[in-house]
Image (cartoon, rainbow, N blue to C red):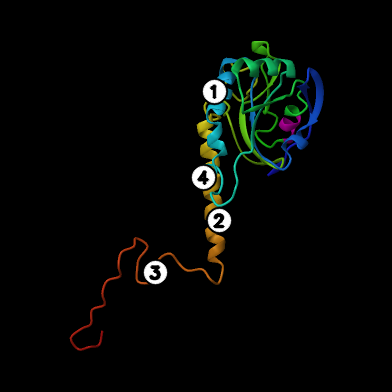
Amino acid sequence: MNLVPNAECFFLEKKKLVRKSTHELFGGKDILLIGLNGAFLPKDEAMVKDFEKNYLKFKDTSLVGDPNDASHIDEIWFVSMNDTYVMEAWWKKMKIKNCKYLADGSGAFSLRLSQQGGMTPDQTVVQMYNKGYGKRSWRYVMLLENNIQMCYLEEETPDDVNTRDNLEDDPFELTTAAEALKMLQARQQTGHIQEINEAALGEDYVPLVDLGVDPNNQPAPERVTDRMGLG
């Protein structure tokens, strides 16, 4: 687990630029933070719309959190190394109502995250000069709890190269909404198993399998005595 870096990013409010701290924006919340290559790019547009379409699934405690605890994703944020004017225009074009954007035009957040090494070291931001984009965020999906990185998915480096810089094609396979839900569900199940194991250490623990029943729930064979009555 890592504390993600703090950075100030710009937002448009009443046509004026205002600065907001990422630690203040994400503090005290369960956040799904998603990295994008850039605004208006076809794959990234499909990515945003995918999460927007499935937004309510991330709010469903029975799918994401412990059903007995009001635990769910509070907000979904997309971070892209574009300025706030571009991101605002893109969001309006796509008619996004639920997911939010973090305009990281200067790379204040993304570059620090890449240097921190919470994911693949120094590859959270990649070079895309071959497409005229400059430096851009790699695609990832990260769960934050009160600014602490809990778990993540990221697109893999293609097998035939040893760097993510200036790739001919940028992958979009592992960071879909469906894969993100699988990640969260797996984490939930892991937590549930841990609770059972901790309960087993308590004095009041009652085994699920009764004595006389094997692990496959087959009744124990009846004991047969011999004719002499010695068995």
Q: Which element carries disc 2, helix, strand or loop?
A: helix
Q: Which callout, 1 or 2, points to the residue nearer the camera?
A: 2
Tell me where residue 118 appears, x and y as whole percent: 68, 37
Pick whichever of labels 1 and 2 is earlier in the sequence: 1
Pick whichever of labels 4 and 2 is earlier in the sequence: 4
Q: Is residue 195 shown in magenta?
A: no
Q: Main secondary structure of the magenta part?
A: helix
Q: Which element carries disc 4, helix, strand or loop?
A: loop
Q: Which residue is mark 1?
A: 160
The mark tally for this picture is: 4
Tell me where residue 84 appears, x and y as whole percent: 74, 19
Label 1 to label 4: alpha-carbon separation: 40 Å
Q: Which residue is mark 3?
A: 210
Tell me where residue 115 appears, x and y as whole percent: 74, 32
Q: Which residue is mark 2?
A: 194
- Category of crowding for the residue at label 3, using alpha-carbon neighbours closer than 10 angstroms: few (below 14), some (14–19), many (at least 20): few
Label 3 to label 1: alpha-carbon separation: 54 Å
Q: Amino acid at mark 3?
A: Asp
Magenta region: which residues?
Answer: 112-116
Q: Which residue is mark 4?
A: 62
**Residue that sits furthest to the front in the current view:** 14
Label 1 to label 2: alpha-carbon separation: 39 Å
Q: Amino acid at mark 1?
A: Asp
Q: Which element carries disc 1, helix, strand or loop?
A: loop
